[in-house]
Image (tube, grey):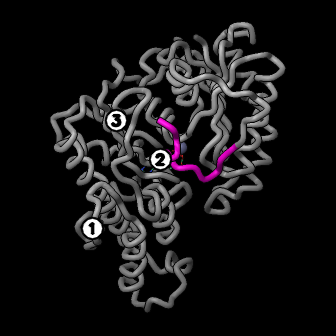
Amino acid sequence: MRVLGIESSCDETAAAVVQDGSRLLSNVVHTQVDIHAKYGGVIPKVAARSHIETVLPVIEQALQDSNSTWDDIDAIGITYAPGLSGSLLVGATTAKTIAHIKQKPLYPIHHVQAHVYASFITEQNDHLSLLLPSSQPKFPLLALIVSGGHSQLVLFYSHEKFEILGETQDDAVGEAFDKVAKILGLPYPGGPSVSRAAELGDETAYKLPISKLDNPYNFSFSGLKTAVLRAVQKEVGVDYTFPSHELKELLNDVQRQNFAASFQTTAIETLVRPTLQAIDEYNPASLVIAGGVAANTKLREALQSRTDLELQYPPIQLCTDNAAMIATLTYYQAQHQPPVDPTSLDIVPSMSMSEIYN
Ligand code: KG4
Ligand code: ZN
């Protein structure tokens, strides 16, 4: 089964073709990161406009790179939730129209669940040369899903059944990286720039809090972000009323690097502790880390060094938003769910994974 996946939930316009839920035939991602970098974050209207301009060329490219014609495509998978409404709408409208005109079965895909499925891609066409895992994860599968919009621990019993063990109660971890980068004056997106600055910093320079919640599998990052803000204000000698966007001018490079390292270490520990506890309690066969923050090598190392279970993760290109993960999940979803009528598919911008029927 050859699936075309389409993704446009935030600031990446992506299309990919995947064979039988494991072989990547093409992977095209048009990122808008340069457009949004000057604003320090994604501007929804600008994002939607860019998706309109690029979605069709990106799909054409994905077909061409995979040596497919429309006749070769057996199904289409489209991200319908969650994400920015304007962004989702462009991809969904495009997919609905194509599915209708080309008479292809259409599957609505949840973006956060799809992040986990990037780890099911183990083969690729020669032109791609990604560093892929050699085998697929096994069930029960514990997934730490960490992105710009979501942070959660999910136990998958099978492709059909999963349970959310815990999730963030406020900010997502990627969002915390992005916000801390802003305070420190590091470029957007904050994840890569904070981790680069952290390499040169002293992680013990500032003591930052790890949140404690009633459910041991839930996370919270908003207290950590505020603690960084207060510590920076204290360090540069201003009080809590001093505007956060002016702090960066008062920091020197050493302070910046030390804050980046102290924050990163604390954020990682906030994620690692509940994950290790879930491994002890549920004894999963596989441990997968997924989403944009899974690109963080310190997080991978911290987790792997404290469990015997082999940590599985996709190559960096498939950690951040892409359509290969959408096409892959589409294949597995199609094994147990019927396609939808293209005219009745609606986007759901703020739908949690807990609302997926399973
Ligand atoms: O999965 P993704 O591409 O988009 C969402 O679905 O949200 O994740 C983007 C997030 C951003 O917040 C970005 O700062 C973060 O992933 N990120 C990282 C790293 N690379 C990207 N966070 C920490 N360390 C990284 N190396
Ligand atoms: Zn994502």
Distance from disc 2 to disc 3, alpha carbons, whole Å, reads: 19 Å
79 displayed left or right of 271: right
61 displayed left or right of 333: right
Residue at 36% x, 34% y is: 156
Quarter of the figure with residue 101? top right
Q: Is residue 138 magenta?
A: no
Residue 177 on image: x %, y % = 45, 59
Circle 2: element type: helix
Q: Mark 1: give few (<14), some (14-19) or many (20+) Cα within 10 Å.
A: few
Residue underneath mark 3: 288
Residue 88 on image: x %, y % = 70, 44
| Earlier sequence position, callout 1 versus callout 2 | 1
Q: Is residue 354 magenta?
A: yes
Circle 3: element type: strand
Residue underneath mark 1: 212
347 displayed left or right of 126: right
Distance from disc 1 to disc 2, alpha carbons, whole Å, reads: 22 Å
